Image (cartoon, rainbow, N blue to C red):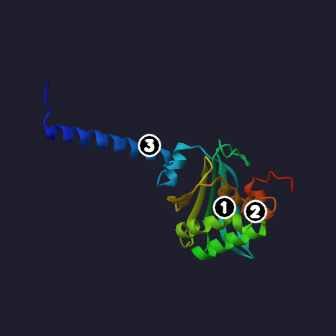
Amino acid sequence: MCKLSFSSYLICFYFVFCLSMNVVFAKNISDEMVFPDSLQSTLATKPFMLVGETTFSILFWDLYKSQLLTTTGKYPVSISNDNVLFTIHYLADISSDELISKTIEQWQYLGISLQQYRSYLPKLKAMWPDIKEGDSLSLLIHQGHSIFYFNQQFIGMIKPFEFGQIFLAIWLSENTSEPKLRRELLGGLTDE
């Protein structure tokens, strides 16, 4: 029978302890969804089809162009099975504070209560940068998670399923303040 020294027992204990910690750590990592740092990497693994696109203008100033894409090429989709990608290409500068203010304004227009969106505001303030002409902001909805990319680089995620719905409602709700944009984003397929 082989006798182990105290130091050998210590080394074995340390090895088993480290191994068990790695298993716990790996489980915690696997519980979290990991998204590529680049939107381009995401698009390379998932085929998206254009539903519609539009340009938002005030008088004769174009402020942004936006596109709606889904994995089915249709909207609405089954959020649990399909993916949605909404991208805004900015044609003018807008500060992060103004962007959040305009978002709140649109939610209020739609009758979305402060209670429904209040918890998202700190996340948006921490995530959304000041926008310069030529920048883009994209929202990828994947398995109910809302993942944001700025100039195709990952900037953050909001987990509650409802956030993606109320964010897209700004443009896609039947009660939107811009029905023409909605029609164009939906590929002109509405009955309006």
Residue 102 placement (x, y as % from top left): 68, 73
Crowd rating for badge 3 (residues with CA inside 10 Å; few <14, some 14–19, many 20+): few
Give the number of the disc on residue 66: 1
Residue at the spot 39% in from the left edge and 46% down from the top edge: 25
Q: Tell me the amino acid under the disc marked 2.
A: Leu
* Whole-number angstrom distance, CA of label 1 to CA of label 3: 38 Å
Q: Is residue 14 above or below residue 108?
A: above
Which residue is disc 3 drawn over? 27
Give the mark, 1 or 2, whose residue is nearer the N terminus.
1
Q: Is residue 168 above or below residue 129?
A: above
Crowd rating for badge 2 (residues with CA inside 10 Å; few <14, some 14–19, many 20+): many
Q: Secondary structure at mark 3?
A: helix
Q: Nearer the viewer, mark 1 or mark 3?
A: 3
Q: Secondary structure at mark 2?
A: helix
Q: Is residue 179 visible?
A: yes
Q: Are marks 1 and 2 in contact (CB under 8 Å)?
A: yes
Give the mark, 1 or 3, whose residue is nearer the N terminus.
3
Q: Is residue 93 visible?
A: no
Residue at the spot 24% in from the left edge and 43% down from the top edge: 14
For the N terminus, give its image quadrant.
top left
Which residue is disc 2 drawn over? 181
Q: Tell me the amino acid under the disc marked 3.
A: Lys
